[in-house]
Image (cartoon, rainbow, N blue to C red):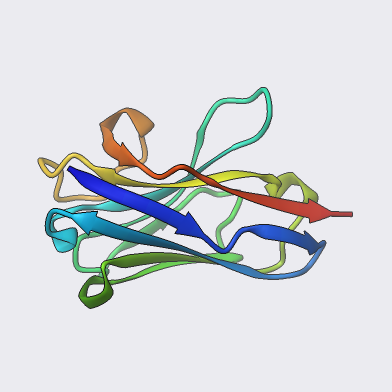
Amino acid sequence: QVQLVESGGGLVQTGGSLTLSCAASGRTFSNYVMGWFRQAPGKERLFVAAISRSGGSTYYADSVKGRFTISRENAKNTVYLQMNGLKPEDTAVYYCAAANDFYSTIQTLPRVYDYWGQGTQVTVSS
């Protein structure tokens, strides 16, 4: 089992920045591809960004490319999402997730992620 706890959400104005953190516990953190997803009210959960086990590779949804940065510190069992240039359409609950440890490459589909945090609300005001 892997337990994930997100933090860092909040209310920010358009153009502002936030950094989300996700602390993991349980199994060896570096064994897992990690991802961030978001879900707006009444909408499906969407991929935002993912990072490889070592942190050497990252991948982003087109909607956040150039504005968001995913990173990880395996020594601290933590994955981050730095969000700059926030827009009202970024408003959502943000979830971090750990992919099934079968996968060694970056994954974008929610269904291959076995472990999820409780989510943290990000609200961007216009």
Residue 83 visible in the snapshot: no
- Location of residue 94 with respect to 41 vertically, above or below: below
- Location of residue 6 with respect to 18 vertically, above or below: above
Frontmost residue, 5 versus 68: 5
At 79% from the left edge and 67% from the top edge, which residue is drawn?
A: 15
Residue 117 visible in the snapshot: yes
Q: Quadrant of the C terminus?
A: bottom right
Q: How many marks?
A: 0
Residue 95 x %, y %: 47, 45
At 71% from the left edge and 67% from the top edge, which residue is drawn?
A: 85
Frontmost residue, 105 versus 19: 19
Q: Quadrant of the N terminus?
A: top left
At 29% from the left edge and 64% from the top edge, which residue is drawn?
A: 57
Residue 2 appears left or right of 7: left
Residue 28 x %, y %: 12, 59
At 65% from the left edge and 34% from the top edge, which residue is drawn?
A: 40
The outermost residue toward the top is: 42
Frontmost residue, 118 versus 12: 118
Residue 82 appears left or right of 35: right
- Location of residue 57 with respect to 104 vertically, above or below: below
Frontmost residue, 118 versus 44: 118
Residue 84 x %, y %: 65, 69
Residue 124 appears left or right of 110: right
Residue 90 x %, y %: 69, 49
Q: Quadrant of residue 115?
A: top left
Residue 58 appears left or right of 76: right
Q: Quadrant of residue 102?
A: top left
